Amino acid sequence: MTTAPEAFNESLPVPLAVSLVAAVVAATFGVAVGAAFGWLPGVVTGVVVVGLVGWLLHRATGHVVVTGDELRAGAARLPRWAWGDAVPLDAIAARRLRGVDADPRAFLYLRGWVPTAVRLDLNDPSDPAPYWYVSTRHPEALAEALGWTKPGAGDATESGRA
């Protein structure tokens, strides 16, 4: 069990607008059943279907956590020793890496409603995935938690090297 403090913790819920539309659509099932069979079966159907949709939307919420010794993206876990370079991706770069530049062997922790991500290269030769693609709303913060250094952050120390 991981006891290291969290360096990064993000929840990626389904957008509120999508949730509201899904709830309204689900409630129409209750109205349809109520029109055919009476108000009580309609109310029961509406409550059950709205509850089921709410549960499914809750289950679709993504979670990304970085601790001192692992990255957790949903149920997937990656130990620190397997981490390679982390690169934050803006919306355009993330879209390309999900599309035309994608490697079919890559592990994707993708949430379609989140436009940005981090690409984490792997140092594990036994893993067939060359990198992990992890959706995040804060790509620089996640990349920093994974060991990425902002360009320019180390210029003062690097300029002193021969």
Image: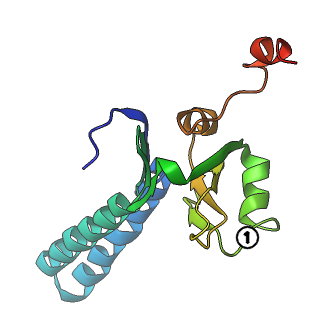
Q: Is residue 49 left or right of residue 65?
A: left
Q: Is residue 1 visible?
A: yes
Q: Nearer the viewer, residue 17 or 9?
A: 9
Image quadrant occupied by the C terminus: top right
Image coordinates for residue 136, horizontal then vertical, percent: 56, 46
Q: Nearer the viewer, residue 12 or 66?
A: 66
Pointer 1 residue: 103
Image coordinates for residue 98, horizontal then vertical, percent: 71, 63
Q: Secondary structure at mark 1?
A: loop
Using the image, determine if residue 78 lies above or below residue 129: above
Q: Amino acid at mark 1?
A: Asp
Residue 52: image quadrant is: bottom left
Q: Residues within 10 Å of mark 1 (few under 14, many from 20)?
A: some
Q: Nearer the viewer, residue 120 or 34?
A: 120
Task: Give the residue at x 11% y 76%.
Answer: 40
Q: Is residue 8 left or right of residue 151?
A: left
Residue 30: image quadrant is: bottom left
Q: Is residue 126 left or right of residue 71?
A: right
Task: Give the residue at x 62% y 69%.
Answer: 129
Task: Give the residue at x 35% y 70%.
Answer: 26
Q: Is residue 30 left or right of residue 135?
A: left
Task: Give the residue at x 79% y 49%.
Answer: 92
Image coordinates for residue 38, horizontal then vertical, percent: 16, 82
Using the image, determine if residue 156 lies above or below residue 137: above
Image coordinates for residue 84, horizontal then vertical, percent: 63, 49
Residue 58: image quadrant is: bottom left
Residue ranking furthest to the right: 162
